[in-house]
Structures are given as C-alpha cells and as structure tokens.
Amino acid sequence: MNVHAAAERVRHWLEGDWSSNQRIGFRLILASCFTTIVVAFLGPSTVTLNVGPARSLLPPWFIPADVGARYGLPLSQWILVPVLWVSIIVGAVGLWVSWRAVAAGWRPSIRRLVYLGVGINLLTACVPPLTSADVLMYAAYGRLQVLGIDPYSIPPAEIFRQTYDPVLIWTERPWQDTPSVYGPIASFSQYLANVLGGDSMHDVVFWLQMMCVIPFIVICGIMIKLAHGNPARQTRSVLLTILNPLLIWAVIAGAHNEAISLVFAIAGLWFVRRSSFVTGLCIGLAGCVKVSLVFYGIALAWGYRRDWKKLLSLGLGAAVPIGIGYGILSPPGALLAASRNTGYVSGGSWAPIFKGALEFVLPDNLASSITGLTGWVLMLVVGWMLSRVVPWDAVPGAHVPARQDPLTIATRTALVISAAWVISSPYSLPWYDLIAWVPLALLTRNKLDMLLLWRGAALSVAYVAGRTVGFTEAMTGVTFVVRDVICSFIQIGIIVAVVRWWWASGRELPTLRGLLTTLREMLPGAGRRPSRRRSAVAGRR
C-alpha cells in the first residue's frame, strides 16, 4: 500500500499544473541549449573537440587554451560530463512540458518561435562541436579528395601516418582507418568545405557546421509550412524540430550530416501533392547523401501505390540523380561503400546485451551475424506493429480522407519505417532519430512522442562521453555502465513498450486472409470501386 500510495503521489505531481506550464517548459529548453553552447565555448576539453588553431575570424569561436589556462580551464571531466547529462535531461523534461502545454491549448506566435529556434541553432553552430569526432572525419574525407585520393578506398590514417598533413593530423579514433561510407553529395559537401577552409581544420569545420545547420533550418521551415492552417500542428512542428533540444544537441552540437540527406527527402514531401517526378528527383538526391534514406523512398512509393503513372514518374525521377551520382560522378564501388556500416553494433542499443549473451555459447562471428539478422527481423515486426497503432491524421491541406491522401500516407509510412529502424537497429545513434522526429511533427500527439523522447534522451546521455580520447579509466567505466547497461535496457524497454502498445490496441495476429487483403489493396487502382458483392450488401442495408 505504501508503494502504491507513493506511486499515486508521483503521478499526481507529474500531472500537476507545472507540467503543462509553457513558461516552465520553455525555460528548461533554453537552459539546456545554452548550457551546451557555454560548455563548447569554454574551449577544447574531454567533451569539446579540438579543431585546431583559429587562423581567421570565422567560427567556431571559443576561449583560446592559453587564456583559459589562467582561469582553470579546461574543466574536469567530472564536472563537464555530469553537467551535460543534467542539461540533456532538463531539455527533455522541458520538451515534455511544452507538449502538454500545447495539448492544454497553448498557441504561441509561430514566427517568434521560429526566430528563436533559428538563433539558438546558429549560436550552437558557431562554437566547437561536442562529444563526437565525426565532423573531423568529414573534413578528412574532403581533404583526401582535395589531394586527389579516393576516400572510398583509402582511409585518412594511411596518409597521415606516412606524411604530415595540416588537416588530417586533427582527426581522432576510432574511424581513422575507415574509408568513407557517404554518398556522392555528402562527399561533395566535404570536398567543398575543404576548398573553402583551405589548410585549416578550424575553418573546414566551420563550413561543415554551416552545411549542417542550414539544411536543418530548411527542414524545419518546410515542416512548419506543411502544417499551415493548423496552429496546434504548427506549434508541434516547431517543438519537435527547430526547438527540439534533443535534436539541437544530437545533430547541430555534434555537426552531423544527417540534415543534408534529410533536407532533400523533406523537399520531396513538399512536392508530393504537386509533382511526382520532382518528388522522385528529391528522394534520389537524398539517396546520394545516405542510402538509409531509401526508407523515405519506400514511403513515397507507398503513397503513390494506387496511381501507377505517378509511381512510375516517381521511380524515373529518383533514377536520374541516383544514376548520375553513383554511376557517373562517383568512383566504382561507392554505392557498396555507402552501405558498409549496416553490419555494426553500437553501444547503447539493445544489441550489446543480446550479442553478449550469444557470445557465451557461440563464436563471435556467428553471434554478430545472428544479431544483425535479428535486427532486420525486429525491424519488420516493430514496423508492422507501429503500422497498426500509429494514428491516421491527415496532413493539413488534404482534400481527401487521410487514407487516400498521398502526402499523409507517405508521411505516416516514413514515420513508421524510420521509427522501426532506429528502434530496432543494432547500430543506432542519437542523431539518427532526426528521420523519425521530422515526420512525427506533422501528426497529432501519440505514444511515439514519449518513446522517441525516452530513446533520444537516453542515447544522448550515453554518448556525452562518446569520444575515445581524453577520458580516464574511471570515467570510461562509468560510461560503460551508463551506455552499455542502463541505456541498452532502456532501448529494450522501448521495444517492449511498442509491443504493449500494439497488444493493448486489441489487434490480432496477422492471418493469411488479412495478408491477401493487404496485398490486394496495394495493387494500383485498388480501392477505387467497391466489388459487386459489397455494393449489393450495401444496397440491402
């Protein structure tokens, strides 16, 4: 009884007035974002990248090491890491409170929110990147291209171990010996950043940060525009994209190139109701950045599945940039290289615990293969379950029912597939969630909101100490517990939560008749005319 009473008190407290107070939510989000900016501005440390000396007035701006040393900088890892942990959790709570405020009727000025979000994102992109050295590898792959070297076949380490290079010398483990896994457009952005930045890693990183934050702002702008005419949905779009502290932390503060790939896919959503061919061009361009955007291609094809002419036009449009990008402009093997990282296992996902259990009785290679296969099976199962429970809400502007509107179908399908992938993949990182958060912003509130919130917060906390350099053994041990134990169990709990959501919905297991019905409905032209039998039955009624 005491435990039950305590649980009830906690529940009542969580449902109190404070939890739907927009001022509290906003202040928590701002506190989280500005903490990130301040920590980065303090200069290179265990959590902030060393991007080399600044030779110009360009960002990223930070306190120089010689100046910081006079004031006790850099701060200890035992200060910085917990501060960022708390900051991420505070931001997640602020996002949750803001959602509840919208549900309670809060309708702020969208323009002011957007301006604020743009300002916060630009400020975040004007200080050094945090916790992940991926941006240094982007710079390295671009540097190889400037030197006339194929980044898909020769890793950066093979060059800087033989000769000094002013850019490659600043890269960090563990990816120095790994060739590029990015598509031709991503590779071009890396090349362009090196052309603009020259021999300065600092300046190259700045241009890479701009190539991250600008597409992110464009993505958010498109989503807000797609939600026009619905103030609640527009507010939701702002909070889940440009003012989402988890995305600002994972994508912008880390300077990851997810936004470059997604901006083309989201542009494709913009054209769904306008031109299927242009939509195809956009998704083809997205695939030229990262092959994982094939999920959006499937979603768009599903949206057009009942109109074979538009479906064909979509395919032709997508084939143009894919053919040019991978067939003409890229070196041989670029497409295979771009799909190279599908066999990895990352800490913080469900996979380390599963794979570790298998390794007690199986060889490592066999355990890895089974883990990878389990991930694909799990994605199909989770995706099928989500497809049964994610609500059907028409995207604003639809003139037909939600289940007949290509944009609504494509958006919902993109959410289902992307969410299933990030939840079930053995190799999953916090910045990958961008492809699920964005389509979620166009739908009404549902249980995926909280599942992605828990997942994103847990993974973000787990990767605060994500770098492989600078941390003591004690901090490495703490990080192992946080990432590979606590976070992994949270990810398993999220999978269980999806199963419970589906089970509670009263859905039955799939039957042969149900599968045949689904296949029939997928055929072009299906659903346009009722069968004679159904018409007769309807007439009798």
Image (cartoon, helix red, strand yellow):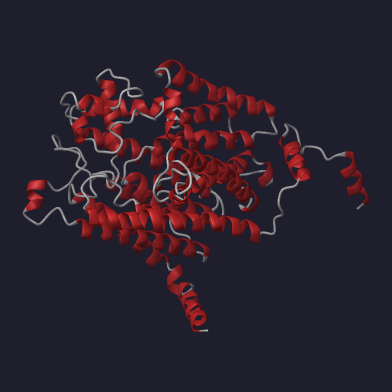
Instruction: From this view, report whether residue 458 is shown above or below residue 151.
Output: below
Report the residue at 36% width, 45% height from top. 251
Report the residue at 37% width, 54% height from top. 483
Q: Nearer the viewer, residue 381 or 28?
A: 381
Report the residue at 61% width, 33% height from top. 301
Q: How far from the left and from the top, in percent, is residue 437?
A: 48, 48
The residue positioned farthest toward the top in the image shown: 328
The residue positioned farthest toward the right in the image shown: 540
**Can residue 243 be seen in the rendering of this structure?**
no
Instruction: From this view, report whether residue 298 is shown above or below residue 239.
Output: above
Q: Nearer the viewer, residue 390 or 147?
A: 147
Q: How far from the left and from the top, in percent, is residue 420?
A: 54, 46
- Image quarter for residue 318? top right
Q: How far from the left and from the top, in percent, is residue 406?
A: 63, 38
Instruction: From this view, report whether residue 21 is shown above or below residue 430.
Output: below
80 relative position to 247: left or right: left
Q: How far from the left and from the top, in percent, is residue 450?
A: 49, 58
- Image quarter for residue 219? top left
